[in-house]
Amino acid sequence: MTEFTSKEITFLESMEEARIATSHNDIPHVKPVSFVFHRDAILVATDYKTRTYENIKVNSNSGIVVDIYKHGAHKAVCVQGPVEIIENGPDFEEYYKIFYKKFEWVRKDPWKENEAPFLRINPKNKISWGIN
């Protein structure tokens, strides 16, 4: 299990946007996503009809970067690991409550189990910089 420092955790908990990378047919696919850091994993909400979801079904390996680009003061945490698709059950309910509380867009357009899944990235590798 990959362990995060307290400073990395504070940084991840303070952020809302990241870029997730998946691939299909050896072609990289990167897109911005809303995320939550929870219990040493990265949670991302997605839809069933996205390239990201389709890619994860075929190849569960992914990468995600959470960063602030500021000239001379870059900060980032990059994580790689396998993804689990969470569509229903207790984990889905827990994650949904977290997203509902954190993001206005969830409150404006709510969904239920099996209508849109969460992706749980289980970190195998991570690197960070600028996190003091």
Image (spheres, rainbow, N blue to C red):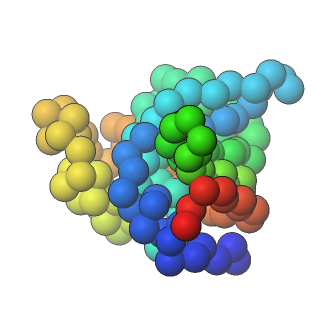
Q: Residue at x 28, y 59 (%)?
A: 98
Q: Quadrant of the N terminus?
A: bottom right
Residue 92 in sight: no
Q: Residue at x 34, y 37 (%)?
A: 115
Q: Residue at x 45, y 61 (%)?
A: 11
Left or right: residue 104 versus residue 24 is left
Q: Who is closer to the viewer here, 115 or 5?
A: 5
Give the x, y percent position of residue 132: 55, 67
Is 48 located above or below residue 75 in the figure? above
Is 40 located above or below residue 85 in the figure? below
Give the x, y percent position of residue 27: 80, 22
Is 68 located above or below residue 27 in the figure? below
* Image quarter of residue 107: top left
Give the x, y percent position of residue 122: 63, 62
Q: Residue at x 31, y 65 (%)?
A: 94
Q: Who is closer to the viewer here, 32 or 51?
A: 32
Q: Who is closer to the viewer here, 47 or 28?
A: 28
* Image quarter of residue 123: bottom right
Residue 97 in sight: yes
Can you name the residue that lies furthest to the right here?
Answer: 26
**Looking at the image, how many numbered discs can be counted on the residues?**
0
Is 1 located above or below residue 79 in the figure? below
Can you name the residue that lies furthest to the front here?
Answer: 72
Give the x, y percent position of residue 49: 49, 23
